[in-house]
Amino acid sequence: MRFANIAGRASLITASGAVDVARASELRFPAQPELLYEMWSDFREWAQTVDSSNGEAYQAKDLGAPSPRPSQVFALALNYAPHAAEGGFSPPTEPLVFTKFPSCITGPETEVTIPGLTLDWEIELVVVIGKFARNVKAADAWHYVAGLTAGQDLSERSVQYSGTPPQFSLAKSFRGFGPTGPMLCTPDEFVSPDDLALSSQLNGVTVQSSRTSAMIFSIPTQIEKISAICDLRPGDLIFTGTPEGVGHRHDPPRYLQVGDVLTSSIETIGELRQTFRR
Ligand code: ZN
């Protein structure tokens, strides 16, 4: 199943276009995407019965975040060995987890205000939780996943490294620093949800390109480790880490500037597109 937030309304994306969930279900399910995660298994069951020939056209500019009001947003640092190495770090032996504060989450096509001189990109696969999760074992973890989407973990590096130890969470939570979308795909949409091509392009030039199978801590392991400490709630997000090729580690460093166009893609899920202003 492919699911999107179109102008704030939960929608199924079918071969014929978008189907509005509240209307097609005659209000059995709510219009607000954020409420659907509380009833995800019922929703998925109903979605299989929907007539997919009645989809309507929609515009990319109307897409919002698939999970627009997560109660928590977890994110992993240094979860790809080459990215750890480009920063001069050893691969972590335990997941390094920080938060992007939920107010930074946006839809897939946005204009972002540059807050400083060192704004950087990080394409990431994002997990959307579909079921309350506490002490979940890795072997069961996919049952707690509503689906996968793409995310940009935009990062202001000067703020991030302004002190010791570094300050990840604020540096990665400026307004607009969490683009997500363009849609959520349930795990069965993928041949292998553990092995997806992901990349980012700056003004059409590829700057990051890897596969999610290169993660140090897999999605099931992340859910096991996090849910041993924090309860995961429906709609919560996990940014699963970025591969090598961030601008901060270019020589010389390359930061985002007015006029840049950043696109970020994950196979099957689609593309994010950010432009930048002062
Ligand atoms: Zn990141």
Image (cartoon, grey):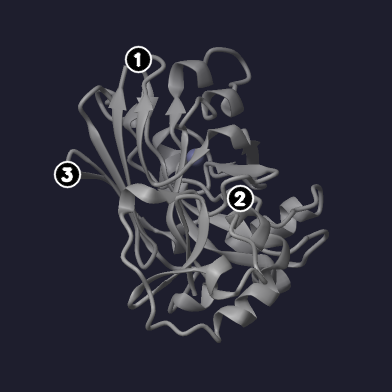
Disc 1 on helix, strand or loop?
loop
Give the x, y percent position of residue 50. 51, 83
Above or below for 91 versus 103:
below
Residue drawn at x 54%, y 44% is 91
Disc 2 on helix, strand or loop?
strand
Q: Nearer the viewer, residue 109 or 123?
A: 109
Q: Nearer the viewer, residue 271 or 99?
A: 271
How far apart are the alpha carbons under marks 3 and 2?
Answer: 28 Å
- Among numbered discs 3 and 2, the one appearing first in the sequence: 3
Whether residue 209 is visible here, answered yes or no, is no
Whether residue 3 is visible here, answered yes or no, is yes
Within 10 angstroms of label 3, few (less than 14), some, or many (20 or more) residues?
few
Which residue is label 1 attached to? 117
Within 10 angstroms of label 2, few (less than 14), some, or many (20 or more) residues?
many
How far apart are the alpha carbons under marks 1 and 2?
Answer: 28 Å
Give the x, y percent position of residue 65. 49, 49
